[in-house]
Image (cartoon, rainbow, N blue to C red):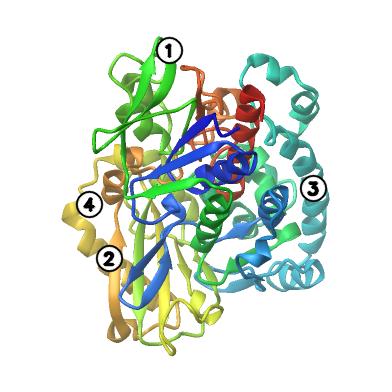
Amino acid sequence: MRDKHIVIIGAGPGGLTAGMLLAHRGFKVSIFEKDNIVGGRNKSISIGPYKFDLGPTFLMMKYILDDIFSSVGKKLEDYVTTIRLDPMYRLSFSDFYIDITDDHEIMCERLNEKFPDSSNGFKKFLKVEKIRFDHIKRCFEKPYCSLLDMLGREFITSIPYLALGRSVNDVLTDYYRDEKLRFCFCFQSKYLGMSPWECPGAFAMIPYVEHEFGIYHVIGGLSEISSAMARVIKDFGGEIYSGCKVSKILCENSEVKGVVLDSGDKVKADVVVINADFGYAMSNLFEKGILKKYSRETLEKKKYSCSTFMLYLGLDKVYDEPHHNIFFANDYRKNAEEVTVKKVLSEDFSFYVRNASVTDPTIAPKGHSALYVLVPVPNNTSNIDWDKIKIEYRDRLVENIKKRTSMKDIDSHIREEFYITPLDWERMGIFKGATFNLAHNLSQMLYFRPHNRFEELENCYLVGGGTHPGSGLPTIYESGMISSSLIMRKLGG
């Protein structure tokens, strides 16, 4: 198959997954990555002696990764070391916290302690959401290149479990009356950059996935998965060109023929796989007039996820806080609505802190820690002037950390720091600064999401959060598997 050349634009998790599978099948694979390091939003960043994941920090559904490596004759554990976390995370409200575990018996005890007589609702949740997950996961494992695909058995039989017309919060009222208890099982909507009150009810299965399969940490950070995939690709003869940006995609008569690099060099290809951010790719990588369905005007009308304000702190101290910590705003619903609907900054905001150094000694010097902090904020349709307010916002965030954690003296222990605003995300090639890509409302899911086999042009495929099945590491890996299968079917691999 070496006579068939596949060019992949971007070495994010979707592109790397596709690259592994296609290189293993004998295709000539060339990946062009604009950064000097692989991973995309799943890469690492180093600030002095401290190492951080740029983006994802929760590894869910690890079995998908195991299957990907197994399918190419490799073992994930030969490349990375994973640790199943217990507790999975701590959820903190203004008046109490609860440590969430995937041990169902212990979880029942903790729920009853904080929310009396709630364990029966939890048991019902596990039972019903398992059925939903078993049905819907089949929909997420196949492509939707035609409306006829919506008539397949997998989709038809899953319709009763899609919770059409209901939000995640609506679905959770079937199990839990207490609002704060529902928050413990609906904050996961933020993994998709959405509010629990607007996120489709089908995604109530996400917390089930956590409780059923657990959450893992990768020693060195989740970016080590990307590095491992890159090694496998090279083992199979694939090439990864770092620091090599694609400026244009070559098209002739509605067929993709290759790419043009920033250097001006042209690279011919039988197939091009786009792993760049979807909105960025559509508005920057094609000559004007080529795209009709996804023109700039159409992109402006699409709904996008929220953005994030990121703060990375290198500390000369290790605090006794759990690995993962979520802190809820006093009025969580108001905060979520301000982020996703009103597009304004909340006075009282929710935030997430990863204190991975309590688990992982490799990301900071001994006695030091690498603290990762994330705040969901509006995307750049808000017109917030982040260049003007970023320092003030950073200070507000640090004050909140001091107020709500044991890190009261954190100011005196900061040795290195770095932050990213929504404007910075956009400058990095993320459309509207929407870090979780296109939103996952029903009109942008399955067939109605950009197709894995790109519908506008021949010989062009998509992977990543902007195509089916959507955002989040497990689903992005699935996109790489779906698209590579379509390519093999086309090219005979």
Amino acid at pointer 1: Ser
Say what secondary structure mark 4 lies in.
helix
Read off the residue under disc 2.
394
Q: Which mark is residue 254?
A: 1
- Residue for point 75% across, 69% down: 107
- Seen from the viewer's position, the closer of residues 453 and 421 is 453
Can you give x and y, in whole percent of width and height, for residue 314 in the image?
35, 77
Q: Residue at x 57, y 36 (%)?
A: 27
Going from N to C along the chain, the mark reached first, 1 or 4, is 1
Q: Which mark is residue 130?
A: 3
Q: Is residue 210 above or below residue 114?
A: above
Q: Is residue 177 visible?
A: no
**Depth check: 245 or 192 in front?**
245
Position of residue 460 measured from the top left corner of the image (x, y, whole percent): 49, 25
The three-letter code of the residue at mark 4 reads Trp
- Picture coordinates of residue 475, whole percent (x, y): 60, 43
Q: Are marks 4 and 3 in contact (CB under 8 Å)?
A: no
Amino acid type, mark 3? Lys
SS at circle 3? helix
Q: Quadrant of the N terminus?
A: top right
**Residue 271, horizontal then vertical, whole percent:** 50, 27
Q: Nearer the viewer, mark 2 or mark 1?
A: 1
Which comes before the other along the chain, label 2 or label 3? 3
Q: Which residue is mark 4?
A: 386
Question: Disc 1 and disc 4: Cα gap in Å?
Answer: 39 Å
Residue at (30% x, 76% y) in the render: 48
Q: Residue 479's image quarter?
A: top right
Nearest the eye: 246 or 118:
246
When asked about the image quadrant of residue 294, the answer is: top left
Q: Residues within 10 Å of mark 2 (few under 14, many from 20)?
A: some
